[in-house]
Image (tube, rainbow, N blue to C red):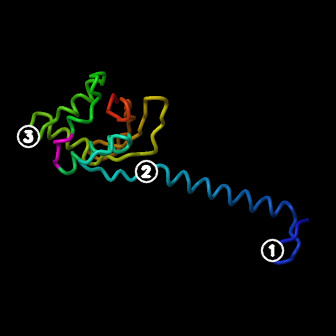
Amino acid sequence: MLMGTDSHEMPLHVVACRSCVAAVVFAALLCVCAKEVNDGGSSNVDFSDPKSVLAAVFYAARSGDADHLSTLCDPHGDGNEHTERICSVRRGGPDWDSFRTNFASGRLNGEPRMTGDTAVVRFIYGPQGKLTENMKLVRRGDRWFLHSF
């Protein structure tokens, strides 16, 4: 038996049970909070943060401001055709409407998983905002760039 905070004795299994419940609630809150990340995108990209680089794609689709898209891809040219298409989209160009349809509802979905000079960021996109995908980014020096998805 342990002494409770109100000077009543509590059986050990009650204390343990309360601790377990508190731990489960805390873990559940962490899971809920970590699922969707505020992407707050803008055309002012923080290239030191892979989330900011990807969020800039969604910002371009929502706002119609695509001037910064060409700066988001791997300068070594090692990205795949999907990221290269994103970086080459221009307002009024042939891919513009499709780009906006697919990425205007886009949002980050979790924290980046980083290993060395690569990061993987889960995101949600699509016409109804229900498709999930992973964007791989690569670090060149101290800057992150879109690589593949």
Earlier-in-chain disc, 2 versus 1: 1
Q: Name the residue located 34 percent from the left edge and 47 percent from the top edge.
A: 107
Q: Is mark 1 on a helix, strand or loop?
A: loop
Q: Which residue lies furthest to the bottom in this view?
A: 6
How far is disc 2 from disc 1 in space, using C-alphas? 38 Å
The residue under label 3 is 92
Q: Is residue 78 left or right of residue 111?
A: left
Q: What element carries label 3?
A: loop
Q: What element carries label 2?
A: loop
Q: Assess disc 1: are there few (<14), some (14-19) or many (≥20) residues with their C-alpha within 10 Å of its C-alpha.
A: few
Q: In this view, does 32 lie above or below 15?
A: above
The residue under label 1 is 5
Q: Which of marks 2 and 1 is in front?
A: 1
Q: Assess disc 3: are there few (<14), some (14-19) or many (≥20) residues with their C-alpha within 10 Å of its C-alpha.
A: few
Q: Name the residue located 45 percent from the left edge and 40 percent from the top edge.
A: 112
The residue under label 2 is 36
Q: Where is residue 2 in the image (x, y as percent from the top left)?
A: 88, 66
Label 3 near label 1: C-beta < 8 Å? no
Q: Where is residue 148 in the image (x, y as percent from the top left)?
A: 33, 28
| Residue 80 falls within the magenta-colored stretch | no
Q: Where is residue 28 in the image (x, y as percent from the top left)?
A: 58, 54
